Amino acid sequence: MYPRKRALERIAREKVLYQRHPGGDISVCVIYPNIYRLGMANLGFQAVFHIFESDPSVAADRAFIPDADERDALRGGGERLVSFERGRPLSDFDILAFSISFETDYLNVLTVLRMAGIPARRADRADRNFPLIIAGGSAVFLNPEPIADFIDLFLIGEGEEMVPEFVERWDATRGSPSQLRALAAVPGAYLPDFYTPVYDDAGRLAAVNYSGPGSAQVNRRLIRDLNRFTTSSLILTEESVFGDMFLVEASRGCQWGCRFCAAGFMYRPIRYRAPETLVAEAKRGLGERKVIGLVGAEMASVPGVADIASAVADRGGRLSPSSLKADCISPALASALARGGNQSVTVAPEAGSERMRKVINKNLTEAEILGAADMMLGEGVGNLKFYFMIGLPEERDEDVLAIAELVAKVLERARARRTRIGSVTVSLNPFVPKPWTPFQWDPMQDARSIKRKVAMLRQRLTRLGQVELDAESPREAYFQTMVSRGDRRVGAILERLEAAGCEGSGPIWHELSEIHREAQAGGIKASSLPDPDFFVTRPYAHDELLPWDFIDHHIHKWFLLAERKKAHHEHQSPPCDVVRCTVCGAC
């Protein structure tokens, strides 16, 4: 079979950096619901696969969404999706474990189940002997509800301790008719069958009826000391999108509290690995690759990062940090990155104007951003990439145009100093509201407005020369917002999209537009599917029950709301008097 041949060729090209064992009698297939080259670039997927495979009672395998040409071959031949290592039908495993890092891959979960010949809905699997289907990963931390009707059990939180506990409980209860209830007792486990959502006449979530034992609250699992575990590349393949890198996770979380950023809140409290641990991992990685990819939300504030970059450069390697906060870039770090041969560095101002950076709590002044650019260019890093967002809450047109003004100043200063500068890339992404952030109540700005702003900015940037604009489609952001903010009813929309064969933003957008029209014509109660706009372009009320409220992230909702109201105060020009302001009701 054609797809199987490609899998065997890929296995032959992989380099496994740990000792594998034959495995026990619990068969687990760890599934990354996207293609191989993306899955093998994901440290979380590699880590959870290793956790399962390290258990002597488990025989672990992998699976991925087939490549586009493989999908055509599967359809044409009527074949079923099989596992990566052993070529075993997915329906033959004891457990299928989805590792989901991005909400947009929720749609691919349904595709995997269909290709495996397994009914998507949990209710349709009840009377037959199908594998137990579980899911975890960072997307699930935030909001598992859009796929809650398809998954038997979720593991909410970090898996280093939770996954072994789950396997031990599964082994102890195998064959028991109450096994699933027993597994739900593992701290961090979420059994959707225990929860029944109730909606009011306006379509909002009114209540969730809980029928399980103990508390309905699910406590997110957290590793307190990251130094107890090493998270770095375990299987190397040049076919991965980071195929030239050895990846090392430096931290989880972020100390800066940007109001749009899920990673800064979902992984709280911020935890760093010790510098000596990171240096040791980097040195080990240099035996395999010349580039060390340092992974985390923001890398310039990692303790000892300049020493890590220097140690890598001293050994002829290059440190490639995921993103740098401008005011944390030191001369020592800039020098070490340049000495290692970095030709490009990513800095994330997020917004063009200082007013907007205050709104989103990105505490960066223009002088700090320009200073960081000067420093990197002066050390010989010739290409800069700036990451910005568009459509943020409280945004005005002048804030968008300020992006071009900021980039123009970077170019002007470089030319005035006669500093060599190759290219400047502006990466522009529509704001997507995320659960567990202060902006979780805010809607996404409509696609037409986003397109207008992108066109306006493109026109300004074109005049500058040397600047490339890389703008994400608002259609993709719309779909991402729907699955980020959606409740359990979004599952029916995902089923419709999957049945229609939707792949890519264009077909998905067309089908979502059709669903929107049907919902508008039928009304909330008459329509068979909810209106996607209900989850995307509607502001959520501050006292509204949110689909993800049952998860305890140890973040008080009142704190997030207070941060949202602070953003409104920053929006005022000048900022409003907190004592007498009556605009936002915060005073």
Image: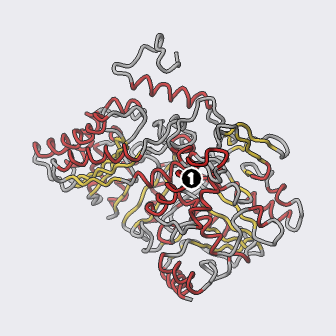
Q: What residue is shown at x 43% (from left), y 22% (from top)? A: 569
**Placement of 410 over or under 341, stated as above or below:** above
Horizontal side of 197 relative to 65 (left or right) equals right
Q: What residue is shown at x 38% (from left), y 19% (from top)? A: 575
Q: How are the colours assigned in the image?
A: secondary structure
**Placement of 164 over or under 256, stated as above or below:** below
Residue 77, percent from left and from top = 58, 87
Furthest residue in direction front, as rendered? 521
> Is residue 193 or residue 438 the one in the foreground?
193
Horizontal side of 455 relative to 170 (left or right) equals left
Assess disc 1: are there few (<14), some (14-19) or many (≥20) residues with their C-alpha within 10 Å of its C-alpha. some
- At label 1, the amino acid type is Glu
Q: What residue is shown at x 69% (from left), y 79% (from top)? A: 22
> Is residue 384 or residue 353 the one in the foreground?
353
Name the secondary structure under disc 1.
helix
Horizontal side of 330 relative to 474 (left or right) equals left
Horizontal side of 348 relative to 122 (left or right) equals left
**Placement of 191 over or under 356, stated as above or below:** below
